[in-house]
Amino acid sequence: MPPVEKRRTEPAADEAHEANEARAVVPTGRPGQFSSTGIGRHLTASALGLGRNAWLLPLDVAFRTVGVRYGWLRSLFRSVPAPIIAVSGRLRAERAAWRALHRVPAYRAYLTANHLDPDRFYPAGILESLPETDKQRYIDAYPLKDRCVDGRIRFKGVTIDESSGSTGTPYNWIRGAAERRIAHRNIAFFARYAYGKGDLVTLNAFSMGAWATGFNMSLGLNRHGLVKSIGPDIGKILSTLDYLGPSYRYLICGYPPFLKHLLDEGERAGFPWASFGLSALVGGEGMAEELRDRLLERFEVVYSGYGATDLEIGMAAESPVSVALRRMARARPEVRRDLFGGDPRLPMVFQYNPLIHYLETNQRGELLCTVSRLDLMTPRIRYNVHDAGGLLSYGGVRRSLSRLGLDIERLGTYPEAAGPRGPLPWSEPLPLPFVYVFGRRDATISVMGANIYPEDLESIIYAEPELIRDLESFMLTMALDDDGNPRPGIALEARTGADFDADRLASVTEQIREGLRRLNLDFREAYLEYPAAMEPIVTAYPPGLGPFAGDAGRIKPRRIAAG
């Protein structure tokens, strides 16, 4: 008997149709959302229970061979049926979990702390019996060394990436040479697919230093073309473009609002944007389609990557079909409802490789990731970054769109998917699964790659006795300045009779800005690099008005404005 009862996923009504297509995953709840079928479980049990290496070893060899060439990998996804890819991905994830519970001291201790005996698990179906991991319950609870394979930190070829928590305490993520090499290759493959194979000059405007995105993007994109790592410095980007001239194709990488600042400042300076062939790669935070529209006024294409320093920066990426899908959902409410449910937010939509990232959703609608490769120094098993979202199979999306009279194979040709200058570049879609992301469930806003938390704001406000005396509540928001640039917003709910005139709001703005620079490492770094984008916008409202409308009677005040 297994040590815990297996959780069973009830099949959807159209399971018979899916089985006829020999799929390993079927829609449940909404079209295309993943769950294992009996066929998938049987194959998993057979492969793992009757000798995992009999299947997985040749699969690994084949995948490593195919994975060294972009064209071979693309052919794999276009020629191998999705059910085989899905089952193979699950098998690899279960093997990674099996290895972690036998060779990672912290993970064994974590299972024991959750009243599970790590020596009594069966290989087949193991993922369904394992608890989730996250920063608070796993990373904070166990030292780095114990979270490494065999409890050993290697040194040669190893780097440490850094991110910060809600109080500004740095989190360190250790990565070996093999792990980074595969991640960089994946970034290069994405660049080849998204931006073509011609000569490309990449200007990397992501933050440099210990932060994972900037450093690794430079190394990954260097495999695809010439790279200059500039950081978020508008003057240096413009001078580099002016120096090299318009005869090259350019890819500019950075946080979404920074690229808008770049365009705005360039236009004010009279820079000849129209003479240059530009593409953009953004990341580090979400991006509204309205902001993409602004960027598409100058950039030919704009794609975003999805990842987390906790896991990998290249977990998933936008593609021509995923961008078209999101823009179609923006324009047609029936598409949004059919694919993403009743949530009023428009999620970002990405495609991912299920052979290296096995994704699930929990009952709270949060995404879980198991990195199924064995090259990680610190394995991540069912890791929860607390992003709200969901999963969609390519076939499920195709059928959903077909019911609405749309063809996924030419989705980018529909007027709703066009940009402000006309249809966006389109290519034959890869039949990879989709992951959609609404945002982080741990209540943050993100500006210029800096996560800002309600707890930071609370500490600042409660440290000012005169301020807190005049407040009913406060809220963290995304605000827009007069030029339409996103900035950190702080809404204050004033008590009756309290006066927040222009002079006082200016004083409060200074208090909050300096408090965030003191408490929040992400904010401090971003402010040093581009202070104009990080200057808070503070507004005051009478009780129960503005973003505080409807809060009366709530047990807990809202600290994040709904958006």
Image (spheres, helix red, strand yellow):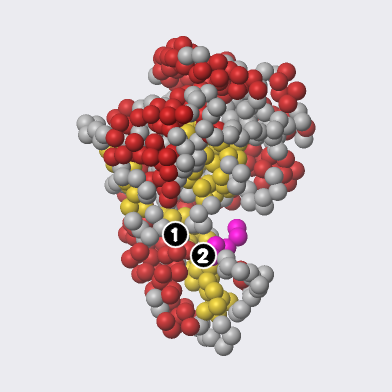
User: Do tag 2 and tag 1 residues touch (Cβ < 8 Å)?
Assistant: yes
Q: Pinpoint residue 135: horizontal percent, then vertical percent.
A: 42, 48
562 inside magenta stretch: yes
- Asked if residue 151 lies left or right of residue 399, the reply is left
Badge number at residue 553: none
Residue at label 1? 452
Mark 1 residue element = strand
In this rendered view, identify the residue nearer to me: 6 or 429. Answer: 6
Residue depicted at x 53% and y 61%: 478
Q: Is residue 542 magenta?
A: no
Question: Looking at the picture, which amino acid does disc 2 mark?
Answer: Leu
Whichever of callouts 2 and 1 sits on the residue coming sooner in the sequence is 1
Q: Quadrant of residue 204?
A: top left
Q: Quadrant of residue 372?
A: top left
Nearer the observer, 291 or 385: 385
Q: Is residue 495 above or below residue 226?
A: below
Give amino acid for label 1: Ile
Q: Which residue in the protein does label 2 denote?
A: 476
